[in-house]
Amino acid sequence: LACLTNPQSTIIVLVARPDASTLKEAARSAQELADMDLKNQVVMINGVFTAQDPSDKVAMSRQEAGERALASMSPVLKDKVVCQLPLKPFNMVGLDRLLTLFDSEVLPDAGPTSEVKDVPISPLSTLMDDIAAPGHGLVLVMGKGGVGKTTCAAAIAVELATRGYPVHVSTTDPAAHLMDTVTGDLGSLLTVSRIDPHAETEAHIANIMEQYGKNLDEKGKALMLEDLRSPCTEEVAVFQAFEKVLNQHKNQFVILDTAPTGHTLLLLDQTGAYHKDLMRIASAGAAAGACAPGTCAPGDCAPAPAPAPADAAACAPGTCAPGACGPAPPSNS
């Protein structure tokens, strides 16, 4: 920690775009780092858009939006901004292009190298008709980080609400930009929540420890807690919170703005694997002592007691397992 807090050995570079939500997130991060005495921070604003044609209303609107976001930037960031990098008209792939990143000159777009053809694209309303047709359901919005999942999730939720459907929109993304995106008033038709992965994980661990760890000694509790700190615990906790949201809004539309695809797929895969493991343990417990799945804590199930010997006279031929019946009566011969 001493090395991290020493500005002579470590510098923390916070990168943000000229966008209100990303600047807000950067300010939160800067404050949390400062609270840990990590104050050797600088801020780089990347992707600053400058319109090349003042008559282009779309381009000017985007430029003005960026200017407004920068003007309203938190004081936590303002004094730390060391540079603004212009948005380049090409992908930053390859050494030659990476070297242009810190060039302040805004390179003009070379324009299309081939004829641009009109491609028919169905409007969002066409998709919305298909989504709205059942009257309720679940919509999972997934994709790589930065592609606009939150924007799409919010747009779908708002459109459904404006059509008169009750909608609940939630997010599992730790960045949690959904609250900033869904603004305005649609009455009781649209509700918004956030599934906090950290809070859900801690609550899940506390619940397990309360149910199954209360009768363990300190060593047993420590071992159980160590096991619960495994990576899949967060996925299980988040999935349970997700299931709770679905159960609370069964007859509504539920729109889930997920974390980046890799995290979401891991969440779904881990919970499936966890469920199979629980069923395997429960099946083993049932074979050992007929415990109902989920009703026993680890180690609580014991082998079923051996059946009491049956009365020899009450056994019909062939109905008893070997040794289950008492000694056979002496033969008359």
Image (tube, rainbow, N blue to C red):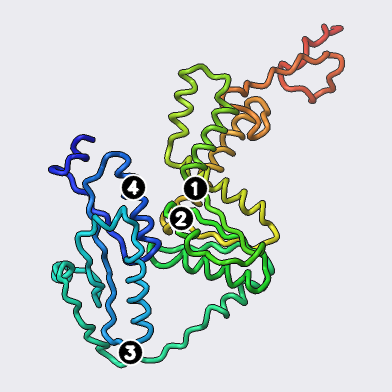
Real-space Cα separation, disc 2 to disc 1, in angstroms: 9 Å
Q: Earlier in the sequence, mark 2 or mark 1?
A: 2
What quarter of the picture does the C terminus occupy?
A: top right
Q: Which of marks 3 and 1 is in front?
A: 3
**Contact between labelled residues 1 and 2, with CB atoms less than 8 Å apart:** yes
* Callout 1: SS: loop
Three-letter amino acid code at the position of disc 1:
Asp
Name the N-terminal-most of marks 3 and 1.
3
Q: In which quarter of the image is residue 14?
A: bottom left
Residue 297's spot in the image, x, y percent? 59, 27
Q: Mark 4 points at which residue?
A: 31
Q: Which of marks 4 and 2 is nearer the N terminus?
A: 4
Decide which of 205, 28 is in the foreground and name it.
Answer: 28
Q: Check disc 2 and report its element: helix, strand or loop.
A: loop
Residue at mark 3:
55
Q: Which residue is drawn at 44% across and 35% down?
A: 229
Which element type, helix, strand or loop, lies under badge 4? helix
Q: Where is residue 262 in the image (x, y as percent from the top left)?
A: 41, 56
Observer-side mark, 4 or 1, equals 4
Amino acid residing under circle 2: Ala
SS for dot 3: loop
Q: Which one is in front in this view, the residue at disc 3 or the one at disc 2?
A: 3
Which residue is under mark 1?
196
Relative side of 282 to 145, left or right? right
Task: Look at mark 2 in the image and give the residue it sits on.
Answer: 176
Please say if 97 is above or below 194: below
Mark 3 packing: few (<14 Cα in 10 Å), some, or many (20+)?
few
